[in-house]
Amino acid sequence: MNRISGRFARYDAARNAGAFVLGVLSAVESKNCWTMAELSGHSTPDKLQHLLARAKWNADDIADELRTYVVEAFADSDAVLVVDETGDVKKGTKTVGVQRQYSGTAGRIENCQVAVYMTYTSSRGHALIDRALYLPKSWADDPDRCLAAGVPESVAFATKPALATAMIGHALDAGVPASWVAGDEVYGADPDLRTMLQHRGVGYVLAISCDRRVPTKVGSLRVDDLACALPMSAWQRRSAGAGAKGPRMYSWAWIATTESAPSGSCSVLIRRNDITGELAFYHCYSPASVPLAALVRVAGRRWTVEESFQTSKGLTCLYPHQVRTWTSWHRWTILVMLAHAFLAVQTATQRDTEHHNPALIRLSVNEFRRLFVALILTPLHHRDRILDWSLWRRRHQQQAYQSRQNCRSKYQ
């Protein structure tokens, strides 16, 4: 809170922002202005509602502080910017950006609000650093509806890849150290995003659909046809990173394409699940020569944005929320992201101070937040008992992990 307090014109607003952040970090199950005001000792929710709707402060200023905080903790020249969208199912039509549209979270078309987020991820940790609300064309073309929801007149319709392109460009302009971008098929299919990254000398590993055609020495071919034509010797078994059940092992194939780029080279990366036979395809670009392992590492880090969604929704209430207007949405999300970044950064810091104990699983963001709530946000009763339970949980999780590994080794 010391980092952002100077961004508020009035002390009361900064103090209420602190109460908000502590509220979303708390163990209160349903987080809204009413429950968090009660937790903070406020007599009414008016102060928190005023903070989100009418107080004088700029959410973009807090976003700059958030980005700096995360980058200072996780900075790595080989870091990856991961973009993805997520949806929040809503009732009614008044909440800004809501309409019937596809939500990857729900897995179907729902009445929902969708936003694009960006995670900064490195070997030390990851956290969300930016977001952009997707305003459907039905909203952008309805000035009265936009006026009622507080949407600025300067906001025009933009596709999700366009929102991601703007966020990535803003981060790079701010000097964020990152060499790669990763994203799913929505972003892999967008030529403007790929062109921007190529011109800025930033590599990418972007998922594409199986019917995507790429230029090769023998002509334009579908990527699934490329996969079928590969000999067995073209596949290499490599880990895409550590998972909850151990290394995520897949077979990978890498094929150069003849696509032109300002510098560097383009290629197609294919991932095969050796158990199910399922294939996944990636359009890749690297400004300099890199080994296959580098592209596999970037592809494997795309899951970090999913983990960011899971923990920020479950622990700090990124969704669901009860804010309706453009301003309140941007303020709610940036303060929630700041709270989530605090958990991610402090978990990484605590891991650095702990001596390796093979009987304990690595400290997780969930476990750190549980300890933070129990030891800091609630009266410090039975501190030893709380710590004992933490060690018991981690010891039990490590035993379960080792048991799974032993079972897997029997079949390899």
Image (cartoon, rainbow, N blue to C red):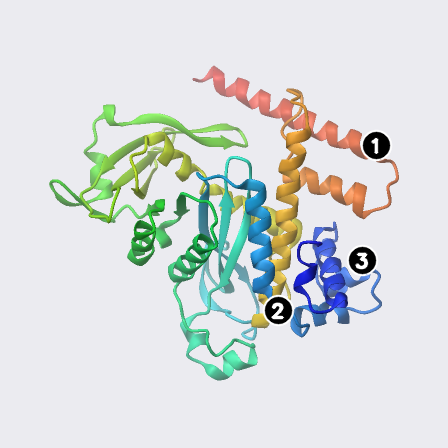
Residue nearer the viewer, 411 or 355? 355
Q: Tell me the SS state at disc 1.
A: helix
Residue 40 image position (x, y, % from top left): 81, 59
Q: Which residue is mark 3?
A: 39
Height in image: 127 above or below 21? Answer: above
Looking at the rendered structure, which numbered label has been put on residue 385?
A: 1
Q: Residue at coordinates 53% horizontally, 81% vertically from top-left?
A: 147
Left or right, 273 with reference to 383: left
Q: Which residue is mark 2?
A: 328
Pointer 3 or 1: first along the chain: 3
Left or right, 273 with reference to 221: right
Pointer 2 or 1: first along the chain: 2
The reply to whether residue 273 is visible in this rendering is no
Residue nearer the viewer, 102 or 386? 386
CA separation, marks 2 and 1?
40 Å
The amino acid pointed to by label 2 is Ser
Please tell me how crowded label 2 is: few (under 14), some (14-19), or many (20+) other residues with Cα within 10 Å: many
The amino acid pointed to by label 3 is Leu
